[in-house]
Image: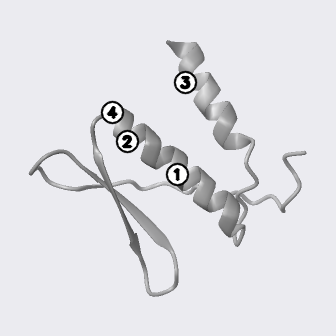
Amino acid sequence: MEGKYLQLLEEMVNIDSGTGETEGLARVGAIIQRQAGVLGYDFETLVGPDGSKHYYLSKGQGKRVLLVAHIDTVFPGGTVQ
């Protein structure tokens, strides 16, 4: 099972997702959404007034869970290569 999670981590870190890299950030968000679905959670994205995205997970009629993490990196575009 560890290999599955290492593969997921590898997929995410091989995406240029620096601050302002909207395409890369969207790709990382899509991976999070996909994984939420695999775990049986509903996924919701709320966009803040500054354009920041906030991800929530919920299951059935339960409470929403806010994911608190940074998906952007400090590295400029092209670093992955």
Q: Earlier in the sequence, mark 3 or mark 1?
A: 3
User: Within the image, what quadrant is residue 4 found in?
Assistant: top right
Marks 3/1: CA distance? 16 Å
Instruction: For marks 4 and 3, give the one nearer the viewer.
Output: 4
Marks 2/1: CA distance? 10 Å
Q: Earlier in the sequence, mark 4 or mark 1?
A: 1
Residue flagged by tag 2: what amino acid is it? Ala
Asked if the residue under mark 4 is in contact with the one under mark 2, i.e. CB atoms within 8 Å, the reply is: yes
Residue corresponding to mark 2: 36
Label drawn at residue 59:
none
Label drawn at residue 30:
1
Residue corresponding to mark 4: 39
SS assignment at label 1: helix
Asked if the residue under mark 1 is in contact with the one under mark 3, i.e. CB atoms within 8 Å, the reply is: no
Residue 57: tell me if it is visible.
yes
Label drawn at residue 5:
3
Categorize mark 2 by other alpha carbons within 10 Å: few (<14), some (14-19), many (20+): some
Residue flagged by tag 1: what amino acid is it? Ala
Residue 26 image offset from top left, x and y in percent: 59, 60
Marks 3/2: CA distance? 14 Å
Instruction: For marks 3 and 2, give the one nearer the viewer.
Output: 2
Residue flagged by tag 3: what amino acid is it? Tyr
**Side of 39 where 47 appears, left or right:** right
Marks 4/3: CA distance? 13 Å
Q: Residue furthest left?
A: 61
Q: Residue at x 69, y 32 (%)?
A: 10
Residue 1 image offset from top left, x and y in percent: 49, 12
SS assignment at label 2: helix
Q: Earlier in the sequence, mark 2 or mark 1?
A: 1
User: Within the image, what quadrant is residue 68 found in?
Assistant: bottom left
Categorize mark 4 by other alpha carbons within 10 Å: few (<14), some (14-19), many (20+): few
